[in-house]
């Protein structure tokens, strides 16, 4: 029987071969599902409707059918978003985040610990950028950079020596004279008409308040409490001297090696960007140097004007007021307005007339400085709007104190240069909206 069955199969296969037909391959499961069933009507892109006698194909045992999201499409989208937000391994992710927080805290503590060194380095770089325009001017006259740095450093050290050897003794003598004359000046102020009118308006005895304040300041315990003790004061003086020496050395080093530093920064950029980056960096360095040098020059002019006004008023502390004006007015715009108040109050000890004369004279100088002196000293180096000057100085003073207020204008000028040279040309080159 089995042999007969095999003979029948061979006969059927032979008959198919004689007819020239080959057996058709069996279609896959996906193809059978995609193929319209017999009797279905094709209506052009719409899923065909099976005929009444058709049977839905049964999936294979190993096939995985997609499970619809509970609640519909909206709830499914929420579940998908939740899977993206919640990490796959919460414990490991939390451990890594904790390590990152600890590293950030350790870095902040390290920066706080070396803040004095960073302050000295930043101040040295700031002063070096201020001295660079003078060195460049000597280089344009055929002097080598090394010789130019030496000449500029000798000139700066000479100015510092003059201040220490000439102005400092005079300042000390004026301070001593002012302290000795303070009782008489206070007594004369208390006998003046405006002081008596102020006491009557306030309804208190200002003489008693001033006497108690001077007595508390003159006591040894109060002095030690204010200064923090003799040892603390001595360590502060030693720290100030060492910081001064470090700043001088860093300034000289930065001035001498400024081209090498900018060249090294340029080498860090890709080759096709180095030329544009070098041009932009050189313009930023020139602008910052011009702003710093111009600010120091304006402070010298301001101090000279204050010194002459105080001499004309007969003030015994003209040198002290000039030095104070130099350090206060080195902060642009805000420093001049601040010293206007300080100088007016200080001249009240002479007389109300002296205070009024000083306020008027110095206010006139502020206007002359703003409209005539500053544009000629700064030139195009500080093309910064006044509102940005004030905002930058306030933010810098809040973050870093006096140093922050000093570097606010150079940093603002640098950001404006980058915006004008990089951002605005890039925006101008975009003439068509991006593809959706």
Image (spheres, rainbow, N blue to C red):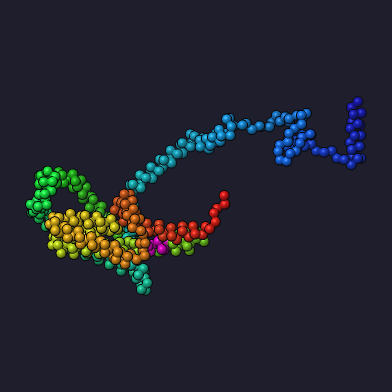
Residue 7 visible in the picture: yes
311 in magenta: no
Q: Indicate left or right for 6 with 128 as reference.
A: right
Q: Residue at 64% across / 33% down in the picture? A: 66
Q: At which x and y percent is residue 327?
A: 25, 58
Q: Indicate left or right for 41 with 179 as reference.
A: right
Q: Is residue 77 above or below residue 303?
A: above
Q: Residue at 40% across / 57% down in the picture? A: 415
Q: At which x and y percent is residue 3?
A: 91, 28
Q: Quadrant of residue 372?
A: bottom left
- Dominant secondary structure of the residues highlighted in magenta in the image: helix
Q: Indicate left or right for 289 with 62 as reference.
A: left
Q: At which x and y percent is residue 237?
A: 22, 52
User: What residue span does the magenta drawing correspond to?
Assistant: 281-287
Image quarter in which the N terminus is found: top right
282 in magenta: yes
Q: Residue at 22% across / 64% down in the picture? A: 304
Q: Nearer the viewer, residue 22 or 151?
A: 22
């Amino acid at each position: 029987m089995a042999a007969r069955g095999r003979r029948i199969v061979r006969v059927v296969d032979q008959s198919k071969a004689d007819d020239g037909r080959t057996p058709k391959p069996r279609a896959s499961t996906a193809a059978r599902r995609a193929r319209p069933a017999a009797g279905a009507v094709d209506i052009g892109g719409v899923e065909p409707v099976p005929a009444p006698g058709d049977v839905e194909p049964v999936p294979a045992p190993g096939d995985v059918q997609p499970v619809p999201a509970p609640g519909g499409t909206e709830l499914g989208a929420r579940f998908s978003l939740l899977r993206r937000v919640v990490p796959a391994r919460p414990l490991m992710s939390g451990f890594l985040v904790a390590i990152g927080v600890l590293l950030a805290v350790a870095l902040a503590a390290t920066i706080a610990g070396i803040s004095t060194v960073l302050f000295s380095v930043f101040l040295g770089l700031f002063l070096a950028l201020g001295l660079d325009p003078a060195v460049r001017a000597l280089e344009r006259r055929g002097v080598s950079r090394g010789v130019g740095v030496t000449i500029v450093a000798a000139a700066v050290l000479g100015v510092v020596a003059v201040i220490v050897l000439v102005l400092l003794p005079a300042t000390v003598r004026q301070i001593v004279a002012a302290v000795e004359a303070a009782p008489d000046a206070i007594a004369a102020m208390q006998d003046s008409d405006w002081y008596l009118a102020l006491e009557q308006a306030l309804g208190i005895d200002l003489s008693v308040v001033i006497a108690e304040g001077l007595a508390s300041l003159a006591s040894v315990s109060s002095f030690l409490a204010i200064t923090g003790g003799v040892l603390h004061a001595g360590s502060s003086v030693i720290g100030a001297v060492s910081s001064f020496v470090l700043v001088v050395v860093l300034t000289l080093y930065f001035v001498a090696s400024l081209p090498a530093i900018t060249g090294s920064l340029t080498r860090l950029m890709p080759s096709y960007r180095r030329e544009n980056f070098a041009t932009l960096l050189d313009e930023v360095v020139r602008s910052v140097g011009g702003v710093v040098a111009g600010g120091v020059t304006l402070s010298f002019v301001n101090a000279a004007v204050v010194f002459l006004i105080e001499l004309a008023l007969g003030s015994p502390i003209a040198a002290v007021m000039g030095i104070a004006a130099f350090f206060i007015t080195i902060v642009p715009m805000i420093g001049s307005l601040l010293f206007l108040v300080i100088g007016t109050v200080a001249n009240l000890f002479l007389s109300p007339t002296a205070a009024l004369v000083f306020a008027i004279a110095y206010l006139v100088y502020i206007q002359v400085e703003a409209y005539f002196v500053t544009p000629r000293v700064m030139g195009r180096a500080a093309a910064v709007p006044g509102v940005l000057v004030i905002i930058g100085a306030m933010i810098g003073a809040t973050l870093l104190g006096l140093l922050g207020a000093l570097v606010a204008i150079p940093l603002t000028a640098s950001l404006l240069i980058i915006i004008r040279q990089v951002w605005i040309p890039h925006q101008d080159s975009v003439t068509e909206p991006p593809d959706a």
